[in-house]
């Protein structure tokens, strides 16, 4: 069977004039995961419109499209084109799950929720000649998921080809997040068997990794086993975690750093505490944000702070206060968003019942446009404030002030290089993307994460395990063969892994 998998892009990502680096960071892991369920003799290809032009004049047996809210219009356009020529099209992903009635008009089959249970079922039904028109995920597990088809990813087109996901969902329930809607009808948070996650990491070449999990620290026992297993691999990595995890799981954070954590994406979301309870962001309520940042910086971990503007307690002062606070605390990079009520979230329900949703042009639900009526701001004021926050935070003067909060010169240099690298060298990124050479910048990123040698990754060294620890690992599912190999040197009563 000839299967073509497509991740469509929103218009901005395909601009002939300017290509922002953020669209060339991560490959389509969701599609590569689904591809692993296809048969060995299926002819499958993955196309990512963020980084390449996708030919649409072919006639595969099956077209698989992943739909995000901002790419929904484009996804439907592609789907309609193929279906008009009689090609079978299936749609899945976040937006399809939020609005199945909208999506089904453009597909032969739609999928709701994660695909690890429904997709193999569909493939079996298709081969048996009786595919259904709708599949909804219920069985949530990552047990038995085949190794992701990374061979189908065009690595050189991405700065971070080694992105990886070892869990699904998140244990929290923030009102504005896609999570509750996407995982409804089953488990909301689950992890891979740790040995599979470690095996996946081993398969990735080079040193740098980026965990795209919503909350890598969401299950402390899992995270601890993962970090223990990664120790000695010589990796440098980035991930996302919560303020709570930083402040309240001290041993875990130290283990993460020992395993190579060098930058953490943290959802601070707002400097107005009253917003947190409104949005059910309970894990941030009453936590000392300054202390969380200090703790990360003391361990040599850079902070990417994520902030949302436009919540109901945000007035005109919110932009300057948020930016100033981030600079004074030496946050290296900041990601700002305009509050966006994604369909089917609790936030959307609230906004709709209050008559505050301004329009349903999904193209503009990109967290850069105001799509609802804010409580204490005018829509235009909110958009202006959002852009001003970016400008102010990434001004040379602000970058320097943020860097100056660091005591060590090499940490200041790292701050300058990392912060400026994303926003001050956009023409460089644009040129690298066009030349298809974005991956060539990876050694530089690694060097900066290391703080030019100040926070080096541990060199790879065999890890010594006591007999007891070896048995424990065995109990955690190491294969008999592997243990047999370790036992070949019994005299030292140690395993080398
Ligand atoms: C990496 C990422 C990006 C990357 C690239 C996306 C990519 N390569 O896939 C970049 C940086 C480009 C990006 C950009 C944006 N992103 Co983004 N991104 C993510 C992130 C962090 C991880 C995605 C991922 O790899 N997940 C892991 C894989 C395994 O899961 P998956 O992709 O969902 O695939 C599974 C299922 O969805 C399902 N599935 C998917 N498609 C299909 C199809 C079929 C047929 C089937 C059966 C199943 C199926 O099966 C897969 C396996 O379970 C998510 C957060 C998240 N946790 O999902 C946000 C997220 C997807 N992004 C989001 C947003 C809003 C954006 C931006 C608009 C942000 C901005 N302001 O710039 C832009 C524009 C996106 C666009 N192109 O339209 C939102 C989407 C909201 C929505 N309802 O669509 C999310 C959920 C973040 C959030 N918490 O709000 N993003
Ligand atoms: S902590 Fe982050 S990923 Fe988890 S529900 Fe809240 S916003 Fe979503």
Image: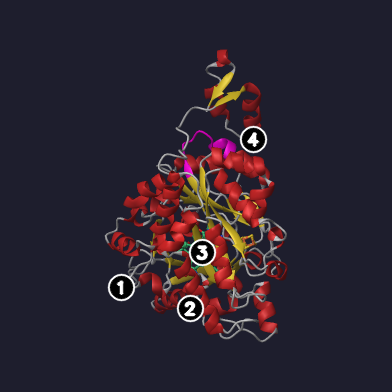
Report the disc number at residue 363: 2
Q: Which residue is mark 4?
A: 476
Report the disc number at residue 386: none
Which mark is in front, 4 or 1?
1
Asked if residue 341 is among those painted magenta in the image, a careful observer would answer no
Q: Give the secondary structure at mark 3.
A: strand
Q: Which residue is mark 1?
A: 16
Q: Which residue is mark 3?
A: 335
Which mark is in front, 4 or 3?
3
* Residue at figure coordinates x 56%, y 44% from the top left: 298
Question: Gap between marks 2 and 1, in whole Å?
Answer: 18 Å
* Residue at figure coordinates x 30%, y 73% from the top left: 17
Q: In the rendered image of this protein, does residue 292 appear above or below residue 76? A: above
In x, y percent, where is residue 400?
44, 57
Verify CB contact (< 8 Å) between mark 4 and mark 1. no
Going from N to C along the chain, the mark reached first, 2 or 1, is 1
Q: Quadrant of residue 450?
A: top left
Bounds of the magenta segment: 227-236
Q: Quadrant of residue 137?
A: bottom right
In x, y percent, where is residue 23?
41, 64
């Amino acid at each position: 069977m000839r299967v073509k998998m497509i991740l469509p892009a929103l218009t901005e990502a395909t601009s002939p004039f300017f290509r922002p680096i953020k669209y060339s960071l991560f490959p389509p892991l969701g599609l590569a995961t689904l591809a692993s369920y296809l048969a060995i003799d299926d002819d499958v290809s993955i196309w990512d419109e963020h980084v390449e032009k996708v030919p649409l004049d072919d006639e595969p047996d099956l077209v698989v499209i992943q739909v995000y809210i901002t790419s929904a219009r484009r996804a439907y356009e592609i789907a309609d084109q193929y279906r008009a020529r009689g090609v079978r099209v299936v749609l899945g992903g976040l937006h399809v799950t939020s609005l199945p009635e909208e999506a089904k008009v453009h597909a032969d089959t739609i999928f709701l929720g994660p695909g690890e249970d429904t997709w193999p079922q569909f493939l079996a039904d298709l081969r048996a000649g009786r595919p259904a028109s709708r599949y909804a995920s219920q069985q949530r597990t990552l047990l038995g998921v085949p190794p992701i088809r990374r061979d189908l990813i065009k690595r050189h087109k991405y700065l971070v080809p080694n992105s990886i996901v070892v869990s699904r969902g998140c244990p929290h329930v923030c009102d504005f997040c896609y999570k509750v809607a996407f995982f409804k009808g089953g488990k909301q948070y689950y992890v891979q068997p740790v040995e599979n996650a470690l095996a996946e990491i081993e398969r990735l070449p080079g040193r740098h990794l980026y965990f795209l999990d919503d909350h890598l620290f969401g299950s402390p026992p899992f995270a601890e086993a993962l970090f223990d297993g990664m120790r000695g691999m010589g990796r440098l990595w980035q991930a996302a975690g919560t303020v709570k995890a930083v402040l309240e799981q001290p041993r875990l954070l130290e283990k993460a750093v020992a395993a190579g954590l060098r930058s953490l994406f943290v959802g601070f979301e707002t400097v107005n505490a009253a917003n947190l309870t409104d949005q059910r962001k309970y894990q941030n309520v009453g936590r000392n944000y300054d202390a969380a940042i200090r703790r990360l910086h003391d361990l040599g971990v850079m902070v990417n702070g994520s902030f949302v503007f436009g919540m109901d307690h945000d007035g005109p002062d919110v932009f300057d206060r948020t930016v100033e606070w981030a600079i004074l605390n030496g946050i290296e990079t900041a990601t700002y968003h305009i509050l966006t009520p994604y369909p089917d979230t609790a936030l959307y329900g609230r906004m709709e019942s209050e008559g505050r949703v301004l329009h349903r042009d999904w193209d503009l639900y990109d967290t850069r446009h105001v799509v609802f009526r804010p409580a204490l701001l005018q829509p235009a004021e909110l958009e202006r404030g959002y852009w001003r926050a970016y400008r102010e935070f990434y001004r040379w003067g602000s970058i320097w002030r943020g860097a100056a909060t660091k005591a060590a010169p090499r940490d200041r240099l790292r701050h300058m290089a990392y912060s400026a690298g994303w926003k001050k060298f956009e023409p460089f990124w644009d040129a690298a993307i066009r030349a298809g050479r974005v991956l060539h910048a990876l050694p530089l990123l690694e060097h900066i994460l290391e703080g030019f040698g100040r926070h080096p990754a541990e060199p790879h060294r065999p890890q010594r395990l006591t007999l007891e620890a070896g048995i424990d690992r065995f109990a955690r599912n190491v294969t008999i063969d592997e243990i047999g190999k370790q036992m070949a040197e019994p005299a030292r009563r140690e395993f080398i892994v």
